[in-house]
């Protein structure tokens, strides 16, 4: 089972949370979205070993970063991979943001 990245714990209470873009990697995974059968939680569990990292998948798909929005059936969803590299990228970008 992979680690969990508690994204919000990287920030102090009340601190502004920036949009973080995640680089595209040749190792990224892709899934066709199936309405009523696919959620970011499910994809997180499949690729990261738990459902808690769905925020990472959301960040990688900013055009559909809120699953409450209607995601068209068949849309390709990017899953940043491998998890450890993605986690380090996010932490580095948050640290750079905090230095600004």
Image (cartoon, rainbow, N blue to C red):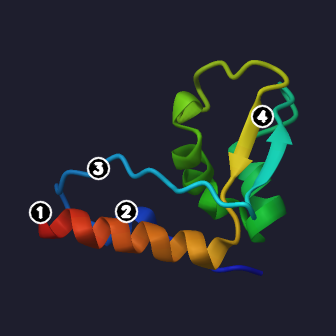
The structure residue drawn at horizontal position 43% and vertical position 64%, both measured from the top left corner, is 7
- Along the polypeptide, which appears first: circle 4 or circle 2? 2
Q: Are marks 1 and 3 in contact (CB under 8 Å)?
A: no
Q: Which tag is nearer the camera, tag 2 or tag 1?
A: 1
The structure residue drawn at horizontal position 27% and vertical position 72%, both measured from the top left corner, is 95
Quadrant position of residue 51: bottom right
**Front in this rendered view, residue 3 or 86:** 86
Q: Secondary structure at mark 3?
A: loop
- Along the polypeptide, which appears first: circle 4 or circle 3? 3
The structure residue drawn at horizontal position 61% and vertical position 32%, both measured from the top left corner, is 67
Label 1 to label 4: alpha-carbon separation? 34 Å
Q: Which residue is mark 4?
A: 76
Q: Which residue is mark 1?
A: 100
Q: Is residue 59 above or below residue 37?
A: below
Label 1 to label 3: alpha-carbon separation? 12 Å
Residue 4 in sight from this viewpoint:
no
Q: Are marks 4 and 2 in contact (CB under 8 Å)?
A: no
Percent x, y of residue 15: 17, 57
Quadrant position of residue 36: top right
Q: Which residue is mark 2?
A: 8
Q: Is residue 9 above or below residue 15?
A: below
Label 3 to label 2: alpha-carbon separation? 11 Å
Residue 22 in sight from this viewpoint:
yes
Q: Secondary structure at mark 4?
A: strand
Q: Which residue is mark 3?
A: 18
Percent x, y of residue 96: 24, 69
Q: Which tag is nearer the camera, tag 3 or tag 2?
A: 3
Label 4 to label 2: alpha-carbon separation? 27 Å
- Along the polypeptide, which appears first: circle 2 or circle 1? 2
- Along the polypeptide, which appears first: circle 3 or circle 2? 2
């Amino acid at each position: 089972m992979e680690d969990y990245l508690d994204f919000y714990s990287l920030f102090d209470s009340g601190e502004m949370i920036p949009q973080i873009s995640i680089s595209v990697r040749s190792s990224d995974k892709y899934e066709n979205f199936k309405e009523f059968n696919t959620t970011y939680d499910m994809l997180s569990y499949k690729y990261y070993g738990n459902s808690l990292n769905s925020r990472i998948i959301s960040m990688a798909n900013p055009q559909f970063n809120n699953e409450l929005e209607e995601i068209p059936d068949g849309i390709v969803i990017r899953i940043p991979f491998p998890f450890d590299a993605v986690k380090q990228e996010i932490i580095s970008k948050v640290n750079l943001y905090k230095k600004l």
